Image (spheres, rainbow, N blue to C red):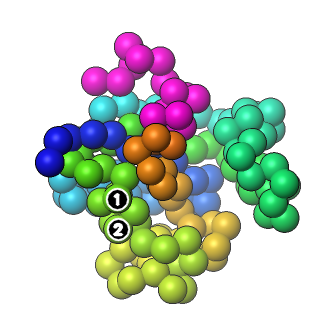
């Protein structure tokens, strides 16, 4: 299986609690190589642009508000079958329903404040990564 990339965001709740280092360590311990990383504070318009695909969904406004509420850490991660393996590592969106030992089960508090975002497909990983990183920033 060839190595590919996925994209992740450590969300404002986890960054604010100081969980970023432990979450990044979990990524590394699971065999993901960090290909790009930066900390930033998304503006409302950046959050709106990133989550544009969800504009018509009922959770959109709350998601944009939350994701622009504080610093986040965006990462591009490299691993064989990256998107699928990463989704398995982080667990389901609702931390209460996430499998024990997953990142969201350990660090998330509710469906919105679930500590991390992970791309749901290789295509979306490339699209999402390109929102925050230029090609020369991904190693």
Q: Is residue 95 visible?
A: yes
Locate residue 66, reporting x and y percent: 74, 55
| Predominant SS along the magenta part | helix
Image vertical order of residue 121 relative to residue 131, above or below:
below
User: Dot 1, crowdedness within 10 Å: few (<14), some or many (≥20)?
Assistant: some
Q: Nearer the viewer, residue 88 or 19?
A: 88
Q: Residue at x 49, y 74 (%)?
A: 92
Could you tell whether 15 is left or right of 42 in the image?
A: left
Q: Residue at x 63, y 66 (%)?
A: 113
Which stretch is magenta? 126-139
Q: Quadrant of residue 47?
A: top right
For numbered disc 2, what is the local secondary structure? helix
Q: Is residue 65 magenta?
A: no
**Quadrant location of the C terminus in the rendered image:** top left
Locate residue 1, reporting x and y percent: 14, 48
Q: Nearer the viewer, residue 125 or 20?
A: 125
Instruction: Identify the mark at residue 88; answer none if there is no mark.
Output: 2
Real-space Cα separation, disc 2 to disc 1, in angstroms: 6 Å
Instruction: Identify the mark at residue 84; answer none if there is no mark.
Output: 1
Could you tell whether 56 is left or right of 63 in the image?
A: right
Locate residue 52, reporting x and y percent: 75, 42
Q: Is residue 137 magenta?
A: yes
Could you tell whether 110 is left or right of 88 in the image?
A: right
Q: Nearer the viewer, residue 13 or 121?
A: 121
The reply to whether callout 2 and callout 1 are in contact (CB within 8 Å) is yes
Q: Quadrant of residue 29?
A: bottom left
Could you tell whether 122 is left or right of 4 in the image?
A: right
Locate residue 104, reporting x and y percent: 47, 71
Q: Nearer the viewer, residue 37 or 22?
A: 37
Image vertical order of residue 115 relative to residue 55, above or below:
below
């Amino acid at each position: 299986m060839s190595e590919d990339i996925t994209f992740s965001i450590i969300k404002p709740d986890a960054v604010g609690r100081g969980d970023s280092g432990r979450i990044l360590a979990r990524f590394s311990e699971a065999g993901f190589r960090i290909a790009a990383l930066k900390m930033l504070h998304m503006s409302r318009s950046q959050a709106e642009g990133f989550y544009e695909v969800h504009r018509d969904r009922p959770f959109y406004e709350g998601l944009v508000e939350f994701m622009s509420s504080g610093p986040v850490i965006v990462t591009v991660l490299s691993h064989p079958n990256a998107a699928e393996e990463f989704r398995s590592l982080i667990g389901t969106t609702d931390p209460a329903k996430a499998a024990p030992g997953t990142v969201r089960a350990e660090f998330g508090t509710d469906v919105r404040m679930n500590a991390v975002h992970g791309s749901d497909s290789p295509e979306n990983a490339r699209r999402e990564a390109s929102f925050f990183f230029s090609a020369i920033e991904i190693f």
